[in-house]
């Protein structure tokens, strides 16, 4: 109810901007972590033979996250356009790898054939980040995060799925994962409201389902047949 009360005072554009800033904050935290690792390597490992690769890897990761953050800030919402879902996943995967792969085994899957939606590309990219980061909040232990797009079960539908599987997930993870009231902070609460708004705005549905050892977020969209 707290998030819904706050969201009630925001128009859709403002809600999306709050979610956008939340994602930017998550990327900034990832860049700071990479920079901290690089500085630690500089001060403690610079003269240790064989550790130069570790130093360069963390510096490169920090640079990539910074570039992703810049690109993310340049996103403009409001454009209704044709969006290719597999392409969206390919574009966001590097940023997800750089910000989440330290804690999670990240796996992405996309079909070779295109999946087209009538949607704002910036909103769909934001949706993937919001759902991935929400799942990341459920555990601090090693876990496997799968992000996949595929044709839906019914004709003319497209599916975005995110699975989190791990040994230390909360027993309430399935009930809480899409509940704004269970989010860890106000920004995350409003981000979940924004995620629901993005999916609803495309005529789709968003739900959580159990999978063995974890939870699945499933966004189903109407797809466009361009043949």
Image (cartoon, rainbow, N blue to C red):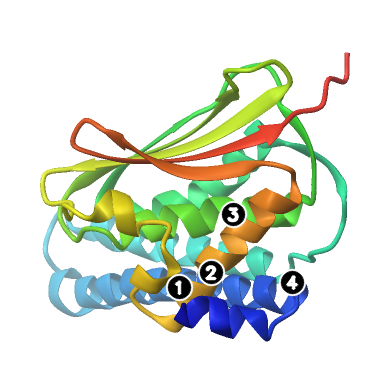
- How many residues crowd mark 4 within 10 Å: few (<14), some (14–19), many (20+)? some
Q: CA distance from mark 4 to mark 3?
A: 14 Å
Q: CA distance from mark 2 to mark 3?
A: 9 Å
Closer to the camera in the image, 136 or 188: 188
Is disc 1 placed on a helix, strand or loop? helix
| Mark 2 / mark 3, whichever is N-terminal | 3
Residue assigned mark 3: 127
| Mark 1 / mark 4, whichever is N-terminal | 4
Q: CA distance from mark 4 to mark 2?
A: 12 Å
Is disc 4 placed on a helix, strand or loop? helix
Q: Quadrant of the C terminus?
A: top right
Q: Does the residue at mark 3 contact the one at mark 1 (Cβ under 8 Å)? A: no
Q: Does the residue at mark 1 contact the one at mark 4 (Cβ under 8 Å)? A: no
Q: CA distance from mark 3 to mark 1?
A: 13 Å
* Residue sitting at x 57%, y 18%: 153
Residue assigned mark 4: 12
Q: Does the residue at mark 1 contact the one at mark 2 (Cβ under 8 Å)? A: yes
Q: CA distance from mark 1 to mark 2?
A: 5 Å
Q: CA distance from mark 1 to mark 4?
A: 16 Å
* Residue sitting at x 29%, y 77%: 36
Residue assigned mark 1: 188
Residue 15 versus residue 138 in the image, above or below: below
Residue assigned mark 2: 191
Is residue 153 among the parts visible in the rendering? yes
């Amino acid at each position: 109810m707290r998030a819904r009360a706050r969201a009630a005072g925001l128009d859709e554009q403002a809600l999306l901007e709050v979610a956008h800033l939340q994602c930017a904050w998550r990327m900034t935290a990832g860049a700071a972590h990479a920079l901290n690792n690089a500085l630690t390597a500089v001060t403690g490992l610079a003269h240790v033979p064989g550790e130069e690769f570790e130093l360069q890897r963390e510096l490169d990761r920090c640079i990539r996250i910074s570039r992703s953050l810049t690109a993310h800030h340049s996103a403009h919402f409001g454009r209704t356009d044709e969006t290719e879902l597999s392409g969206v996943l390919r574009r966001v995967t590097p940023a997800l790898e750089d910000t989440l792969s330290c804690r999670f085994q990240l796996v992405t899957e996309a079909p070779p054939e295109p999946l087209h939606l009538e949607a704002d590309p910036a909103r769909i990219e934001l949706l993937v980040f919001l759902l991935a980061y929400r799942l990341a909040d459920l555990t601090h232990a090693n876990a496997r995060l799968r992000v996949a797009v595929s044709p839906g079960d019914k004709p003319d539908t497209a599916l975005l799925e995110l699975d989190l599987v791990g040994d230390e997930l909360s027993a309430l993870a399935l009930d809480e994962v899409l509940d704004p009231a269970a989010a860890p902070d106000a920004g995350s609460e409003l981000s979940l409201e924004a995620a629901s708004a993005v999916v609803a705005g495309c005529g789709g549905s968003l739900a959580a389902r159990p999978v063995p050892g974890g939870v699945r977020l499933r966004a189903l969209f109407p797809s466009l047949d361009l043949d």
